[in-house]
Image: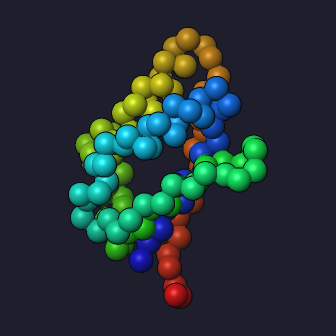
Amino acid sequence: MFVAMNRITVSEEYLEKFEYMFKTRAGEVDQEKGFIEAKILRPKKEGQPYIVMTYWESEADFNHWVDSGAYMKGHSRAFGDMQKAREEGRKMPMHSDVETYEVFAQ
């Protein structure tokens, strides 16, 4: 099993919209080959990042999704907000760091 962990730091003014986008997400990833599940974690302490954990049958399945049109569609609202901030010379509303892991024991 392969796990992608996305640590997303969200600006204070973007928190409400960020959570709304996940609650109303497109669900594109749910239909992808090899996708098992996703967990979206809200930080308990101020200043900590949100964490999005996705579980996959294999790294190849994850990479196929990242390279797909479904990935772009599933992230289009967030990408649009970031593009708009860039064009307006504003601070990015969020920053993402992705880490990947292989499950070796359960």
What colouring method underlies this structural image?
A: rainbow
Where in the figure is residue 13, as x and y percent of width and height?
Answer: 64, 26
Where in the figure is residue 79, as x and y percent of width and height?
Answer: 44, 31
Along the line of sight, the residue nearer the viewer: 51 or 56: 51
Where in the figure is residue 98, as x and y percent of width and height?
Answer: 55, 54
User: Quadrant of residue 26 in the image?
Assistant: top left
Which quarter shows the N terminus?
bottom left
Farthest residue toward the top?
Answer: 88
> Residue at (51%, 31%) from the top-left corner?
17
> Residue at (71%, 53%) from the top-left corner?
44
Where in the figure is residue 48, as x and y percent of width and height?
Answer: 72, 48
> Residue at (35%, 69%) from the top-left corner?
36
Asked whether the viewer can see residue 76, the reply is yes
Q: Is residue 6 above or below residue 100?
A: above
Asked whether the viewer can see residue 67, the reply is no
Q: Is residue 81 above or below residue 97?
A: above
Q: Is residue 9 left or right of residue 98?
A: right
> Residue at (29%, 68%) from the top-left corner?
34
Along the line of sight, the residue nearer the viewer: 71 or 22: 22
Tag count:
0
Along the line of sight, the residue nearer the viewer: 36 or 22: 22
Farthest residue toward the bottom?
Answer: 105
Q: Is residue 5 left or right of residue 76?
A: right
User: Quadrant of residue 30 in the image?
Assistant: bottom left
Q: Is residue 105 left or right of residue 67?
A: right
